[in-house]
Amino acid sequence: MKKIKVATLGFSALLLATAPLASAQTNIEPTLTPLIQSETQDTVVSAYGKKFIISPSAEGQITDEELEAISMQATSDEIIINNVYTSLNDNNLRLGGASPERENNNVISPNAWYDLSIKWSVTKFVKQTDTPLQAKQIATVPAGGTKKISTKYTTKSSFTVSGSAKEKGLTAAVESNLTGDLTYTIEKTYTGPSIDSGYVSYVFWLTPFVNRGTWTAKGTGVPSGDEYGPYNGSYEEPTKFVEWTQPIK
């Protein structure tokens, strides 16, 4: 029999933002407090009306907001958190945080005939974190069965740039300051519940999460030193994938 450990989870009632650029969410640090520390045991958490079984590979990598989001997507009372795949870039900025300014030298056609390029400084401001997108079903495996899956899931970054800014080469500068697409590759065999477990099947899911916010950019003409901007826009960029399972009775 597989050993498990029990954890307590502190949380508050939160409104989950799902519409683009809706009200900002509060980013809460994970509050899992295992009674037994081990890298080989699952952590059991009761929260948001669900029972979460968090694998060692996902422990400490999932927030209260993400658990709440998955609890709203799941139809079962029990949820297994299998894996968390997180971007390694600075798209995990906290709510209200700003990224460091990044400079980009772009050879473009600026307004002034004497400028050969514009050096852009772009800063991102986070307005929403831990915003879930629609869950994607990976596979359904019946009791006693297996299913081999070979696929990829990609969440793309997106942003807006006004027409006048596009003419000054700002699109490439903003794009280079985003993290780009986040891809989760699956090459594995999924196993259903045991015949005598009382479950009919396991349904495996993948939930993407994104940050949403705004950016601002200021430019300096080369060689004139003239100022361009500031320009502003919005963005959305992927932060992580959470793979989870619904046991079906």
Image (cartoon, grey):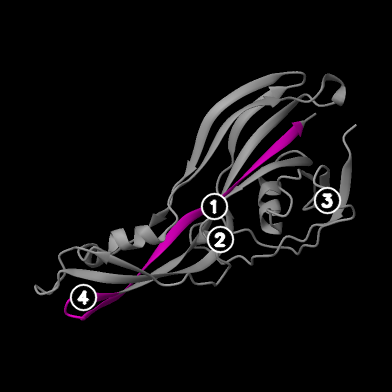
Query: Which kind of residue does numbered mark 1 sit on?
Result: Ser
> Which type of secondary structure does the marked residue at label 3 adopt?
strand
Circles 1, 2 touching at the beta carbon (< 8 Å): yes
Residue under label 3: 46
Residue behind mark 2:
92
What secondary structure is found at the residue carrying circle 1? loop
Query: Of label 3 and label 2, which has the lower sequence position?
Result: 3
Residue 48 picture location, percent across and down? 77, 53
Find the distance from the CA under tag 1 to the CA under tag 4: 33 Å
Q: Which amino acid does label 4 sit on?
A: Gly
Q: Give how far apart the Cα atoms at labels 1 and 2 are.
A: 8 Å
Q: Which residue is drawn at the image coordinates 48% and 69% (left, top)? A: 99
Left or right, 124 with respect to 242, comes to: left
Name the one closer to the observer, 77 or 167.
Answer: 167
Query: N-terminal of the two: label 4 or label 2?
Result: 2
Do callouts 3 and 2 mark residues in contact (Cβ within 8 Å)? no
Which residue does the numbered mark 4 point to in the structure image? 221
Residue ranking furthest to the left: 113
Q: Name the residue under label 1.
A: 87
